Image (tube, helix red, strand yellow):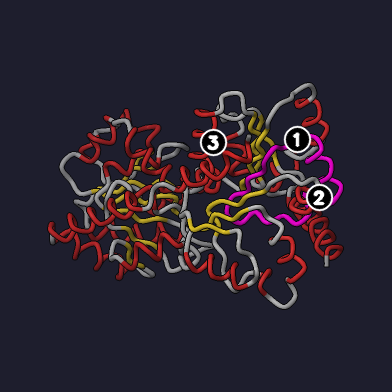
């Protein structure tokens, strides 16, 4: 099975290289790995001392690891941290992140790459975030007796490790030093398969979003745009999400709407403008009268989390595709949240739904009815806003629990 796995990694790389001929994200993935190990060797030559290797798939997983990185740098100023990403959507945005020493793409998970990378980094400790189960890297860390911990993980019976054909990989999961997981179901599942080195710590993203809320800066243009109107913020939206928002905008012309799309390439922005002909881009807002506008399109990266401070309602995108994006950034500011139907892999979404803060809107009419009902009853809106804030506050603390466990490993 190991051979089949490694062959699959090679074939995946070949497919990505073929796709790079016409797909920008694939091209970034390929170009970012050219001569990568040689570059890492040159960068790390002469660097000594304790080193932590932190790996995340993309930007969302990085946000889960970010509170831990910040705490480590605060308490261990001489500690070297090397951060790797699998996806361009993480690497390209955070390649200059100042709190780590180096940021790289993760070389493809072949046995040779794993041996060379671990030898070059020589980590004191490795931290993989959530779902990043790379067999050859895990195997090499085990062979070199390097502690490996997973943080903010979630396990489900449907994952390959727990199928009849996944026993070989499950064995290597059992070699992991410790798992910090998000829910009790994950604890029980691992223990039932003989893996007892597991703690229920929750999700480190709660610590991150709580910190964002405590340090948020005002935005005068958005304040003027909202004025005294109710505002719905569509965060990380995709075209299917924007179709629902279009119907809402037509039906409620006094409702202010901000759309912060997941992709901000020119084609997508123009698609949004075709749905909302009178919308204005944030980059062009200084030429407009904000009071006369209904829809504002955010055409830059990095603003979304701070914009939730002005929202009364949030629609989080991705629920008509692979899965919803970050609901916690909205929840920490306190508001009802709407999503598409694909949310079942996200513990926080299920929790928010259970307490009534989050509702699933799988068509235009459903969204319109839900929004109308909330905006007609201020007491319901305030009640759900408070429940939303309390949910986030009650789930902070994962970072401290993980850091406490790590202290002996670092010494």
In the image, the segment drawn in magenta is 108-136
Taking depth in this image into account, of 396 and 341 the one nearest to the observer is 396
Instruction: Decide which of 291, 145 is in the foreground and name it.
Output: 145
Q: Residues within 10 Å of mark 2 (few under 14, many from 20)?
A: few
Q: Is residue 57 left or right of residue 355?
A: right
Residue drawn 40% across the image and 41% down it: 304
Which label's residue is closer to the chain start, 1 or 3?
Answer: 3
| Percent coordinates x, y for residue 209 in the rendering | 39, 44
Please say whether residue 267 is visible from this viewpoint.
no
**Magenta span contains residue 115:** yes
Q: 189 or 362: which is nearer to us? A: 189
Q: Residues within 10 Å of mark 1 (few under 14, many from 20)?
A: some
The residue indicated by pointer 1 is 121
SS label for mark 1 = helix
Residue 103 appears in the figure: yes
Residue position marked by numbered label 3 in the rendering: 69
- Residue drawn 64% across the image and 47% down it: 87
Distance CA(mark 1)–CA(mark 2): 15 Å
Q: Is residue 44 left or right of residue 182?
A: right
- Residue drawn at the location 40% of the way across and 56% of the way down: 242
Tell me, yes or no, whether the highlighted magenta stretch contains residue 223: no
- What kind of element bears circle 2? helix
In the rendered image, the quadrant that contains the N terminus is: bottom right
């Amino acid at each position: 099975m190991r051979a089949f796995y490694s062959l699959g990694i090679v074939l995946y790389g070949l497919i990505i290289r073929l796709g790079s001929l016409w797909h920008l994200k694939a091209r970034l993935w390929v170009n970012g790995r050219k001569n990568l190990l040689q570059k890492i060797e040159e960068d790390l030559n002469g660097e000594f001392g304790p080193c932590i290797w932190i790996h995340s798939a993309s930007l969302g997983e990085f946000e889960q690891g970010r509170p831990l990185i910040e705490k480590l740098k605060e308490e261990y100023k001489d500690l070297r941290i090397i951060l790797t990403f699998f996806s361009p959507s993480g690497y390209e945005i955070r390649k200059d992140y100042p709190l780590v020493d180096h940021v790289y793409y993760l070389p493809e998970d072949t046995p040779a790459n794993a041996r060379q990378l671990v030898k070059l980094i020589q980590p004191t400790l490795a931290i993989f975030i959530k779902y990043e189960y790379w067999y050859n890297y895990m195997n090499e860390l085990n062979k070199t007796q390097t502690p490996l911990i997973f943080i903010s993980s979630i396990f489900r019976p449907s994952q390959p490790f727990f199928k009849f054909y996944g026993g070989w990989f499950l064995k290597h999961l059992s070699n992991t030093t410790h798992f910090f997981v998000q829910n009790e179901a994950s604890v029980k599942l691992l223990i039932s398969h003989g893996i007892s080195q597991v703690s229920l710590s929750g999700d480190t993203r709660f610590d991150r979003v709580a910190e964002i809320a405590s340090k948020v800066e005002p935005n005068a243009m958005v304040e003027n745009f909202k004025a005294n109107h109710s505002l719905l913020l569509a965060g990380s939206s995709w075209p299917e999400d924007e179709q629902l928002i279009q119907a809402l905008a037509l039906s409620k012309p006094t409702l202010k709407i901000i759309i912060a799309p997941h992709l901000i390439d020119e084609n997508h922005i123009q698609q949004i403008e075709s749905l909302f002909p009178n919308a204005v881009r944030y980059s062009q807002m200084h030429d407009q009268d904000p009071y006369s506008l209904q829809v504002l399109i955010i055409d830059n990266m990095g603003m979304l989390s701070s914009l939730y401070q002005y929202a009364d309602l949030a629609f989080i995108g991705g629920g008509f595709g692979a899965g919803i994006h970050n609901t916690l950034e909205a929840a920490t500011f306190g508001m009802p949240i709407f999503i598409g139907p694909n949310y079942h892999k996200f513990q926080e979404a299920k929790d928010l739904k259970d307490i009534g803060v989050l509702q699933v809107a799988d068509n235009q009419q459903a969204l319109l009815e839900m929004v109308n009902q909330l905006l007609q009853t201020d007491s319901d809106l305030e009640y759900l806003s408070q429940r939303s804030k309390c949910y986030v506050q009650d789930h902070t603390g994962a970072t401290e629990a993980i850091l406490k466990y790590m202290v002996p490993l670092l010494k």
